[in-house]
Image (cartoon, coloured by chain):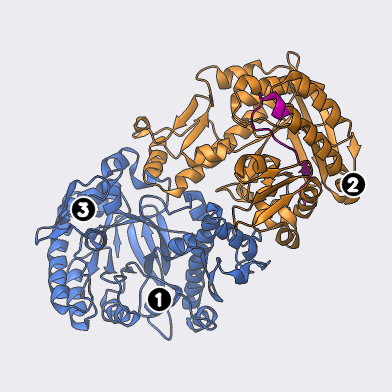
Chain colours: A orange, B blue
Amino acid sequence: MQRAAFAFELLAQARDSRARAGVFHTPHGAVRTPAFMPVGTRATVKGVDSHSLARLGSQMILANTYHLHLRPGEALIAELGGLHGFMRWNGPILTDSGGYQVFSLSDTRRVDDDGASFRSVVDGAQVRFTPERVIEIEAALGADVAMAFDHCPSQPDARGEVELATARTHAWLERCVRRHRELGGEERGQALFGIVQGGAFDDLRARSVDSVCAHDLVGYAIGGVSVGETREQMLIAVQAAAPRLPDDRPRYLMGVGTPRDFLDAIERGVDLFDCVTPTRHGRTHQAFTRQGTLNLRNAAHARDARPLEEDCDCPACAPGYSRAYLRHLAKSGEMLGAQLLTQHNLRAFHRLMEEIRAAVLSGSLAAVRQRWLGAAPLGD
Amino acid sequence: MQRAAFAFELLAQARDSRARAGVFHTPHGAVRTPAFMPVGTRATVKGVDSHSLARLGSQMILANTYHLHLRPGEALIAELGGLHGFMRWNGPILTDSGGYQVFSLSDTRRVDDDGASFRSVVDGAQVRFTPERVIEIEAALGADVAMAFDHCPSQPDARGEVELATARTHAWLERCVRRHRELGGEERGQALFGIVQGGAFDDLRARSVDSVCAHDLVGYAIGGVSVGETREQMLIAVQAAAPRLPDDRPRYLMGVGTPRDFLDAIERGVDLFDCVTPTRHGRTHQAFTRQGTLNLRNAAHARDARPLEEDCDCPACAPGYSRAYLRHLAKSGEMLGAQLLTQHNLRAFHRLMEEIRAAVLSGSLAAVRQRWLGAAPLGD
């Protein structure tokens, strides 16, 4: 696949799973996959400036169409150089379409076959999202990848709702593809990714893959997860969708998750992830480590002179900030605690992806799985 | 003056004022004066890690005996390598003695000639501070400079209260000096600074200088300011005290202030400052610039593509974050806004001090005063 500035190079496949290593080329640079994308909802990864993000090993970040449309509005962002200029991030950016937020955040939403209406949480105004409108907003935001506007069902096992949402997602994708093409397509420097729905139903996921992949797109995503489903339901969705997606396009599992989720999904062929876990956990003083998740508010850390992880090169561990110090910051409500833990968690996720990638290139993920999940389960 | 690892080198004096440039040598390095010390109340300068602090040009920082005694306690900090090890700051540190906090923060305090009792804001426990006890706590915290325990009067113009507080401060200084010496004196790597009181009364300040300077100390401070007095009262205190302090010791004006205050005090012979203004203003989205103070919440900045200051090398300005972006962060309640503005403000204060120092070395502060205060008054 090679189109304008976009290309996905498949470099290697694991011997013992569907795990793969590749490079996703975008107008703002290459993303070595598998990759984790930090979430920058309102054009900021909470607590981390762009320079620090790059130093942590972030390659591509996500921003949120729904939130940015409400404030400060895509027109202002376009005027200030698009998301890249606005947030001073010169690497690749992906905007999610707002589908997930419309269906998860808006109590007052009204959805019909044409689109969705909801009240702005910023000023109470009525807002109308249609597939065309969302593509226009994403075009103004100017990310490298725009996600199609989808209907994300609230329950992955409510077959009726999932069928309706999946059919609607397919109809809306048609309209997204058309509007995206009218606005210049990939030649404008922005790719469109389609989103597979189908809940936790193997047959619906398989049919959704067929419908979505009928459109020749730069990449494909598995949506409708991270809505409160069980791990089993999430894996049914991934198992049903990922292996059926074309080999030569990046596969993105939306809103997932923890180190265990990454390993499970990567072994089923997923390449890209985003999730608020590292940043949100950081702000609640929880640290991801190979020895499990540490809650820095716990008294157990009160006199612990060790850093979070001995061999970590993040801004919390490398200068040697002790667990005792991080606990002091947590107990004192000092913002530096959240900042340091957020950065540690992002670095931990990026390091995990780097290890996974090296492991795929050398044939097997088994050693990484043992190293990260062998001792205490992570993120369960 | 040369004692153990401490020395103050006077390098130059301005032609047209008492402003001076020097170097204050401490066991953890040299401080080029005039200098501004960021405030790290609870062993963290709010929102800025130690590595970033150094890059902003911070030379010496302040931490707070009162707050750190209450949480996490000086024993824990000593166990973790003292303040330098605890907060991973290898440069000079000064601890204030808690005098100001005891008298400004504790509603329930009871003060007598022996010391002060108050309730812990952390757990409600009764706490007793005497001069000896404070020196012991500061010894455990292990800063390069420990401030003497003083009685800070609440009103600089209430003569009766000021006289009592000043006399008590002198009596307590005797006891601080004795305990400091018993614990090893400067040979232990920690200097003691005495504090001049006397409110806004020229005669009381002059007498206080005589009493305090009867002790041969590494440095001297002007206290009892930043308690809500007028600028005129503050300048009376500085004018009465600073020129009478020995030339060959650093002079530290406690808790002050703004760029205008710095220039006024430096022209009267002050070398060292600390204040929460840059960090606190940063958290309320106010930026110090040569063009005056900007409130980033104002609608005026909504579409402004300019950085805070064109020629600033801070982590907000150098990557080119626009005022519009900083306003977006402020309006969205995103912590990155406070982080970037805090760093800008610290850098602005350090740059001002660097400019002042260069100006003193070349003879006159007039140009700096014109550059920083010529247009719009700053920090008034």
Q: Position of residue A328 (x, y in %)?
A: 37, 42
> Residue B225's quadrant in the figure?
bottom left
Please state which of the two labelled residues, at mark 2 or mark 3, is closer to the viewer.
2
Q: Residue at x 90, y 50 (%)?
A: A182
| Mark 3, residue position | B135
Q: Nearer the viewer, mark 1 or mark 3?
A: 1
Q: Chain of mark 2?
A: A
Would residue B257 be found to the left or right of residue A265 on screen?
left
Q: Pick the residue in front: A203 or B118.
A: A203
Residue type, label 1: Asp
Q: Are marks 1 and 2 on the same chain?
A: no
Asked whether, in this view, residue A178 is left or right of residue B246, the answer is right
User: Where does label 1 land, which residue?
Assistant: B261
Q: Is residue A347 above or below residue B52?
A: above
Q: Indicate whether residue A152 is drawn in magenta.
A: yes
Disc 2 marks which residue? A181
Identify the element where label 1 is drawn: helix
Q: Are marks 2 and 3 on the same chain?
A: no
The location of residue B263, given as percent across then percent down, is: 43, 77
Q: Are the residues tagged 1 and 2 within 8 Å (C-beta)?
A: no
The tally of labels here is 3
* The magenta segment: A142-162
